[in-house]
Image: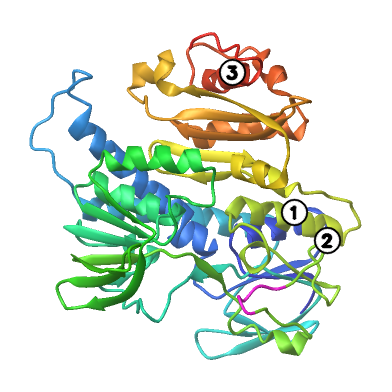
């Protein structure tokens, strides 16, 4: 079979790119090594983790806030098995939806491990031992990423686990030790802390979500600390041992001393690595760097012009929606269009509660680059809608250019921050100023009023409700 485009990998970047290719009239095939489509995001990442986050938040609210709302419950308990069953139902429905979209758009779906035979030929090794060979005028590498680990933290998927196993535990841990306080660690830690587990974060950096604006990390730590979590920043894990019924984590403290944490599970959440294993890149004239990434130009082309790469296997943040934008970008580039992606305006979200969402520059980046800026912030506790829903943790922080007032960065920690950040993205795509947003009517009472008030605060300190 000969195709205009072959996409290797069916995660958000791969399947979105394949659909756009088909919409543009290109004969398209998509290759997926697993039985279901959707990649990490739909099967063991974004979608199932959000299902568990929502379930755990419902339980936490039932246990801690329902009485204040006038809702009385008795004999409240966690049925973790049912939470996992519901989560899997959400996953199954979502992956079946992607399979439907492949059929709807007449995309050939091929299951097996794809590898290069030459720059235009892909061999698919199937689960039953058979092989199939197809050729493509254009090929897109969209194989995603896998959890990262180190020799000192051997993952056995029983007691020393990754995010994948954390989504299918049969019992709530008594003490969950999490190595890494980034996005994945924060999300899964909050799930089990809400369900009653003791959670300890061990982080090599000096804050939670260290790649985001420091204000967000400080505020998130405050919120998760209310769940009873402990934090060990600037600590280095030297070894992790599964002792059968418990896990022993040995740690170097900032003062050079040794300490030990003992728990029943240890979640290794130290990042992810590009997954290019088995692609046989050399046969296509390609190679990956020491981190497993594939080099691409500004058109997402590799050094072999008809082979493209996107998402977690190339530079930039490992975000599903970044990969989606790149999939569309590649499809439109192939047919001669001139698409554009502003990577600075791709939002980043942490789905804890309160949620964290950000777009644009952090304050630390503006200082480092010497860009003159001003800031305005507004706390949710001053907002009527937040008080009504009892979601008063967090704030909106706005960064604007000191001279032009153009919005440079928006950072939100609070209720529905993941949805609120879209307004900031729209404003910044159109080069809006803080005053532009402050003069737009926002419905009252809503959470988004906090964005308007933060923009007012950045504009000559004009916040109305502070």
Q: Is residue 84 left or right of residue 380?
A: left
Q: Is residue 75 left or right of residue 359?
A: left
User: Does 273 sit above or below residue 288?
Assistant: above
- Label annotation for residue 328: 1
Q: Is residue 148 left or right of residue 251?
A: right
Residue 48, by quadrant, is: bottom left
User: x, y percentage for residue 207?
Assistant: 43, 50
Nearer to the camera, 320 or 293: 293
User: x, y percentage for residue 187?
Assistant: 39, 50
Return the disc, 3 or 2, that comes first in the chain's sequence. Answer: 2
Q: Which residue is mark 3?
A: 457
Secondary element at image label 2: loop
Q: Who's the residue at 29% across and 44% down the image?
A: 56
Q: Who's the residue at 60% across and 44% down the image?
A: 364
Residue 103 visible from this viewpoint:
no
Secondary element at image label 3: helix
Nearer to the camera, 3 or 307: 307
Secondary element at image label 1: helix
Residue at the front extreme?
Answer: 255
Q: Is residue 280 left or right of residue 270?
A: right
Return the disc, 1 or 2, that comes first in the chain's sequence. Answer: 2
- Label annotation for residue 299: 2
Q: Which residues are magenta?
A: 290-294
1 vs 2, front mark: 2
């Amino acid at each position: 079979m000969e195709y205009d485009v072959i996409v290797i990998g069916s995660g958000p970047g791969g399947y979105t790119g394949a659909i756009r290719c088909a919409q543009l009239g290109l004969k398209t095939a998509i290759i997926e090594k697993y039985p279901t489509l959707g990649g990490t995001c739909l099967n063991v990442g974004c979608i199932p983790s959000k299902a568990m986050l929502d379930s755990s938040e419902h339980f936490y609210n039932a246990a801690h806030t329902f009485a204040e709302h006038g809702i009385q419950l008795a004999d409240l308990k966690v049925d973790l098995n049912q939470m996992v069953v519901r989560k899997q139902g959400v996953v199954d429905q979502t992956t079946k939806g992607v399979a439907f979209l492949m059929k709807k758009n007449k995309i050939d779906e091929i299951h097996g491990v794809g590898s290069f035979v030459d720059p235009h030929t892909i061999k698919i090794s199937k689960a039953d031992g058979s092989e199939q060979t197809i050729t493509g005028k254009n090929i897109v590498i969209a194989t995603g990423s896998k959890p990262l680990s180190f020799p000192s933290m051997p993952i056995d998927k029983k007691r020393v686990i990754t995010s994948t196993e954390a989504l299918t535990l049969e019992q709530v841990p008594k003490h969950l030790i999490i190595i890494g306080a980034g996005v994945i660690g924060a999300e899964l830690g909050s799930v089990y802390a809400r369900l009653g587990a003791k959670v300890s974060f061990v982080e090599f950096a000096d804050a939670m979500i260290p790649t985001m604006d420091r204000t967000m990390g400080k505020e998130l730590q405050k919120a998760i600390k209310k769940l009873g979590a402990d934090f060990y920043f600037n600590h280095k894990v030297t070894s992790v041992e599964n002792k059968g019924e418990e896990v022993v984590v040995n740690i170097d403290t900032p003062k050079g001393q040794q300490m030990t944490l003992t728990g029943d599970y240890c979640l290794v959440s130290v990042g992810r690595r590009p997954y290019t294993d088995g692609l046989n890149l050399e046969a296509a004239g390609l190679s990956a760097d020491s981190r497993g990434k594939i080099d691409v130009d500004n058109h997402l082309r590799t050094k072999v012009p008809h082979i493209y790469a996107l998402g977690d296997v190339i530079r930039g943040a490992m975000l599903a929606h970044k990969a989606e934008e790149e999939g569309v970008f590649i499809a439109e580039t192939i047919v001669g269009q001139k698409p554009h992606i502003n990577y600075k305006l791709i939002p980043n979200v942490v789905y804890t509660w309160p949620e964290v969402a950000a777009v644009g520059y952090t304050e630390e980046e503006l200082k480092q680059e010497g860009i003159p800026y001003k800031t305005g912030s507004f706390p949710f506790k001053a907002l009527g809608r937040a008080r009504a829903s009892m979601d008063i943790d967090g704030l909106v922080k706005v960064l604007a250019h000191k001279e032009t007032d153009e919005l440079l960065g928006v950072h939100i920690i609070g209720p529905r921050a993941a949805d609120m950040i879209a307004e900031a993205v729209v404003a910044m795509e159109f080069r809006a100023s803080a005053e532009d947003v402050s003069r737009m009517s926002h419905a009252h009472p809503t959470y988004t009023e906090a964005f308007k008030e933060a923009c007012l605060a950045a504009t000559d300190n004009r916040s109305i409700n502070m």
